[in-house]
Amino acid sequence: MKKMLMAVGVLVLCAVIQLPFTAYAKGAEATNAEAAFKADIAKNVGQGKKIYFACPMFSQADKNYNLEIVKVLEDYGYQVFLPQRDGIEAAQLEGKTEEELTEMIFGLDASEVKKADIIFMNIDGRVPDEGACVELGIAYANGKRCYGFKTDTHSVELGLDLNPMISGCMIKIFKNFDGNQLKEEMKQYLSKNAL
């Protein structure tokens, strides 16, 4: 009986020791699958020029800067769907219920994300715009090429970095706290590289 208990104890000990290695191996498999998924996305760089521009559009400053960035992209031959220009703004619709607005806006924007080859996302703010984050998730899950840009210092002031669930989707993030300089850096990049 004593030998049997020792044998069971050894088996349990081996199983306990093996668990972390098994979990690590499964994590490595998931990491490898994610790396392969990202590699498939990256292979399409330069293929297709339709961009969905994910952005906040709640102030005139937001809207003006969105238009400036979109102009740079369009000057380099990209076809950009800009929700404030090409979509539906809830603030400009009267007499619609919340359910009707949700159906109209989500339906159009989700459809346009799926039609696009690329998502280009404004990641300014303490946290990026919630709607833009959903659009990024839809785009990434559908194998779209994802790019972002950041011009503000919110996260720097708080000692934070970008959320890995956002930056992990991106092929490239353009960062410069000077918005005009960021546009110049984008132009330099686009003159030599395709998105």
Image (tube, rainbow, N blue to C red):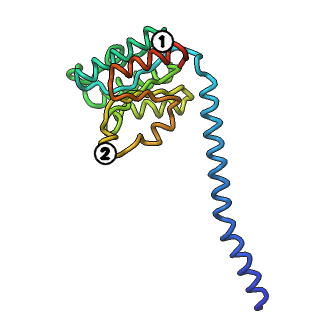
Residue 181, by quadrant, is: top left
Task: Tell me if mark 2 has few (under 14), some (14-19) or many (20+) residues whose alpha carbon lies within 10 angstroms of its own.
Answer: few
Is the N terminus in the top left, top right, bottom left or bottom right quadrant? bottom right
- 141 or 34: which is nearer to us? 34
The residue most toward the left is 94
Residue 54: percent from left, percent from top: 39, 25
Eyeballing the image, is 162 above or below 171?
below
The amino acid at mark 2 is Leu
The amino acid at mark 1 is Tyr
What residue does disc 1 label?
Answer: 78
Query: First in sequence: mark 1 or mark 2?
Result: 1
Q: Would residue 125 appear left or right of 134 to someone viewing this image? A: left
Residue at screen point 72% across, 72% down: 14
Residue 17: percent from left, percent from top: 67, 69
Residue at screen point 45% across, 31% down: 136
Rendered image: mark on residue 135: none
What residue does disc 2 label?
Answer: 158
Residue 147: percent from left, percent from top: 47, 27
Eyeballing the image, is 163 above or below 131?
below
Task: Tell me if mark 1 has few (under 14), some (14-19) or many (20+) residues whose alpha carbon lies within 10 angstroms of its own.
Answer: some
Q: CA distance from mark 1 to mark 2?
A: 35 Å
Nearest-to-viewer mark from 1 and 2: 2
